[in-house]
């Protein structure tokens, strides 16, 4: 099997993750070492959202990279977006497809098309603040997906966790079309709706932004990490 791992990037000079207080650029080294230790993609494709500072791995030989011409917004905090651009908060600017896409979604589908045009079998999206546990966790997820369309996990509130997504490249154009037309105000709501019309499979291991109990599982992932979570994923605690 062949696959490409993609991720987005944004950070301001003094930007820190709200949950753990760790500087985002400093965390990028942790993320890079973590994802490299548990996966073997053909390449990492990183899309920078017009950031004033770049991740520590930006010039690594394993990375293909591109910077967007603007910051298209993202989280509800509007990171990198000025007050006058409130339209970008939460769901971004209107695209050529006449549907609002935040920066993360623009990055993800740019990378997915790159994977499709490079004739790899799968595209895997791992967000810039998501850590993974378990050797060959990505290969395990891909084997589980097989000829299905995409894999992900539900959040406790019934929407979809989007920090780890696995796409079958044979389905990427169909996934994109379904995403554009799915009901929902957020990517989490849209992917949840898509499970009703596409060949979706849950990931074969637990993981989402609220999960706890890491030691109970050989394979697991988490986004929006606390300091204690980071220590666990980098092997500094049991």
Image (spheres, rainbow, N blue to C red):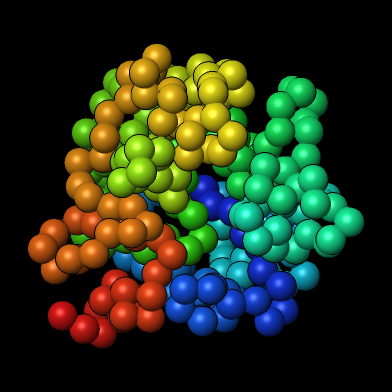
Can see residue 109?
A: yes
Q: Quadrant of residue 224?
A: bottom left
58 sits left or right of 84 in the view = left
**Where is residue 26 shown, x and y percent of the image?**
54, 80
Q: Quadrant of residue 173?
A: top right
Q: Quadrant of the C terminus?
A: bottom left
Give the farthest residue toward the bottom: 236
User: 174 above or below 96?
Assistant: above
Residue in the image at 14% along x and 68% along y: 215
**Where is residue 5 shown, x and y percent of the image?**
46, 47
40 sits left or right of 186 in the view = left
Can see residue 29?
A: no
Residue in the image at 45% along x and 78% along y: 20
Q: Quadrant of the N terminus?
A: top left
Q: Nearer the viewer, residue 231 or 61?
A: 231
**Where is residue 92 shown, x and y percent of the image?**
72, 43
59 sits left or right of 191 in the view = right
**Where is residue 163 shown, x and y percent of the image?**
44, 50
User: 157 above or below 28?
Assistant: above
Residue in the image at 53% along x and 73% along y: 18
Q: Nearer the viewer, residue 96 or 35?
A: 96
């Amino acid at each position: 099997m062949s696959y490409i791992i993609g991720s987005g990037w944004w950070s301001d000079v003094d930007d820190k993750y709200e949950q753990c207080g760790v500087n985002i650029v400093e965390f990028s080294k942790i993320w890079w070492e973590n994802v490299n230790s548990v996966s073997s993609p053909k390449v990492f494709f990183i899309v920078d959202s017009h950031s004033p500072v770049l991740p520590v791995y930006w010039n690594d030989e394993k990375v293909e990279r591109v910077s967007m011409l603007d910051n298209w917004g993202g989280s509800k905090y509007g990171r990198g977006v000025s007050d006058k651009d409130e339209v970008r908060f939460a769901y971004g600017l209107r695209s050529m497809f006449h549907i609002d896409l935040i920066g993360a979604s623009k990055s993800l589908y740019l990378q997915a098309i790159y994977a499709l045009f490079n004739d790899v079998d799968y595209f895997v999206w791992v967000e810039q603040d998501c850590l993974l546990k378990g050797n060959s966790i990505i290969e395990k997820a891909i084997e589980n997906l097989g000829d299905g369309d995409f894999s992900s996990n539900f959040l406790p509130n019934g929407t979809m966790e989007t920090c780890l997504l696995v796409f079958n490249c044979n389905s990427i154009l169909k996934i994109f079309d379904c995403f554009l037309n799915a009901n929902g105000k957020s990517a989490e709501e849209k992917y949840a709706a898509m499970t009703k019309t596409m060949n979706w499979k849950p990931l074969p291991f637990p993981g989402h932004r609220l999960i706890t109990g890491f030691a109970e599982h050989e394979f697991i992932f988490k986004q929006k990490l606390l300091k204690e979570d980071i220590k666990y994923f980098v092997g500094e605690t049991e």
